[in-house]
């Protein structure tokens, strides 16, 4: 993972640790230590969720255990991180191999997205993540 940041902060370390666990295919047990009880994930509308979504900790943990059935070989290539206090913005290129047929992608294809996420970290835990995911197909 190419990380382009000069100064490490506890909030940044927490977020990057969380991303590395996701990349390694971690399930709920692995991601739970990074997330606050009040954690909320807000996804802006995108190709696979045109309405967007808002999910609580329980929903995110359940989804983490199911994600290994949907994608494998996740890679987050971090382009830029920006920190201000407990707020961490991460811009990254994400890709994964699709393990089942999805709208726009067939099993075995690589799914890609340009992503930006804004995390809020408090007391060493992530309390919120706002994600803006731009999915695209190669050559389109």
Image (spheres, rainbow, N blue to C red):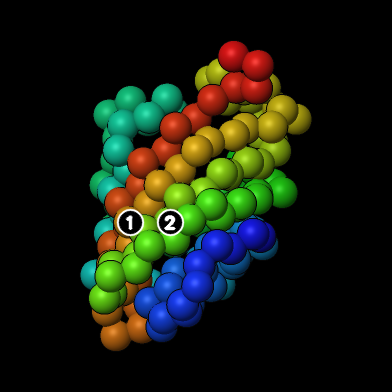
Vertical side of 137 occupied by 123: above or below: below
Residue at which label 1 appears: 118
Can see residue 92? yes
**Residue 96 location, x and y as percent?**
65, 41
Q: Which quadrant would residue 45 be assigned to in this image?
A: top left
> Quadrant where the N terminus lies?
bottom right
User: Would residue 62 be visible to someone looking at this image?
Assistant: no
Work out whether residue 12 or residue 109 is closer to the camera in this orientation and state it.
12
**Distance from Cα at disc 1 to Cα at disc 2:** 6 Å
Q: Quadrant of the C terminus?
A: top right
Give the quadrant of residue 134.
top left
Horizontal arrangement in the rendering, residue 93 relative to residue 86 (left or right)? right
Q: Which residue is mark 2?
A: 90
Closer to the camera in the image, 5 or 86 = 5
Badge 1 crowding class, 10 Å Cα cut-off, few under 14, some 14 to 19, many 20 or more, is many
Q: Is residue 124 left or right of residue 71?
A: left
x 45%, y 69%: residue: 15
Q: Could you say whether the residue bearing mark 2 is in a helix, strand or loop?
A: strand
Q: Are the residues flagged by discs 1 and 2 in contact, CB closer than 8 Å?
A: yes
Task: Examine the rendered structure and indicate whether residue 139 appears above or below residue 37.
Answer: above
Residue 12 position in % (x across, y down): 43, 73
Q: Residue furthest top?
A: 140
């Amino acid at each position: 993972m190419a990380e382009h940041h000069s100064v490490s902060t506890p909030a940044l370390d927490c977020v990057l640790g969380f991303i590395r666990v996701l990349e390694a295919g971690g399930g709920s047990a692995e991601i739970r230590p990074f997330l606050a009880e009040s954690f909320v994930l807000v996804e802006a509308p995108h190709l696979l969720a045109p309405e967007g979504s808002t999910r609580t900790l329980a929903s995110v943990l359940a989804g983490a255990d199911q994600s290994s059935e949907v994608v494998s070989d996740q890679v987050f290539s971090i382009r830029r991180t920006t920190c201000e206090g407990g707020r961490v913005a991460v811009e990254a290129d994400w890709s994964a191999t699709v393990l089942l047929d999805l709208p726009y992608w067939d099993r075995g294809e690589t799914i890609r997205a340009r992503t930006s996420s804004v995390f809020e970290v408090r007391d060493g835990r992530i309390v919120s993540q706002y994600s803006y995911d731009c999915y695209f197909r190669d050559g389109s």
